[in-house]
Image (cartoon, grey):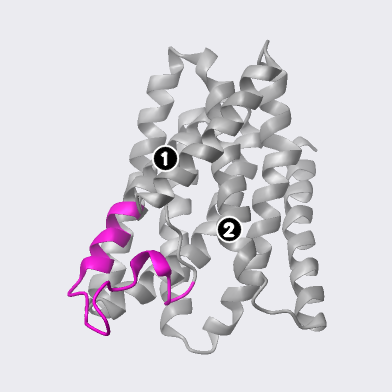
Amino acid sequence: MSTLGWIVLASILGGVLSVSCAALFALNSRAQHYVGALVSYAIGALLGAVFLDILPEAFAMTSSIATVSATLLFGILLFFVLEKLVLWRHCHHDHCEAHEPHQHGTHDHGRSGTMIIVGDTFHNFVDGIIIAAAFLADTELGIITALAIIAHEIPQEVGDFVILLHSGYSKLRAFQVNLISSLATLVGGILGYFALQTMQSWVPSLLALAAASMIYVAVADLIPGLHKRTELHETLKQVTLIALGVGTVVLVGALVTG
């Protein structure tokens, strides 16, 4: 399969699969109990992809490791600012402080839903560019990066779906807008592929930004939620699932290279 073919396939799967699974979890009360497990698994997949594949590849492709490291630092600070602007906020539950109504006890009349759609579309577009940069660097890296993105998109989309419902959207309408928003991943992937064809020197920096976004989502957004469950058996389950996420990255890498 061509590089563009891989990018298109990964972008479509990343969007449609995550939205479909999110709808299943959000509308099924039994399935919602597994969202916490998905979050733990996603942390492992994200951090495994970053430290075992994305950053080593970026360092190998550049003549200046210091520049890539500086880009990584810049990216983490950038995503902090974007989160403050409510463009990057990931919600994995229905009580996300970034989207709470500002009036005491009043309905937000869809404001939360609008912010969710805008933020999610922006994030999906960037995810598409990240997928493109990863596949242009190496097919194995692209597959692992896409896997990590899909892993963390599912619990995020569940939270988004629930907030859309609370904002007054019907179940069908919430699914439709999430699906349309997910197409931004495909747009970002295709645009990223053609833009980066003539800017190969940008790939290491884009990989560093990809690593920054994944580290930020894992550390600033996902991990704090795990600390709300302090029981020993819950902690052991979380650690096991995080290790499983890392192990999946290692296994996929071994299968692809093998």
Can you identify the residue that label 2 sits on? 151
Residue lying furthest bottom in this view? 30
**Image position of 104 with respect to 45: above or below:** below
Residue at 28%, 53% in the rendered image:
118
**Image position of 240 with respect to 139: above or below:** below
In this rendering, position of residue 205 left or right of residue 234: left
Rendered-image quadrant of the N terminus: top right
Q: Tag 1: residue type?
A: Val
Residue at 76%, 39% in the rendered image:
52
Q: Which residues are magenta?
A: 93-119
In this rendering, position of residue 174 left or right of residue 28: left
Query: Could you give the CA–CA distance between mark 1 and mark 2, rounded to whole angstroms?
Result: 16 Å
Residue 224, quarter of picture: bottom right
**Image position of 102 with respect to 208: above or below:** below
Classify mark 2: helix, strand or loop: helix
Picture coordinates of residue 139, whole percent (x, y): 62, 32
Residue 74, quarter of picture: top right
Between 148 and 9, the one nearer to me in the picture:
148
Mark 1 or mark 2, whichever is nearer to me: 1
- Which of the two labelled residues, at mark 1 and mark 2, occupies the earlier sequence position? 1
Q: Is residue 186 magenta?
A: no
In this rendering, position of residue 244 left or right of residue 5: right
Can you identify the residue that label 1 sits on? 126
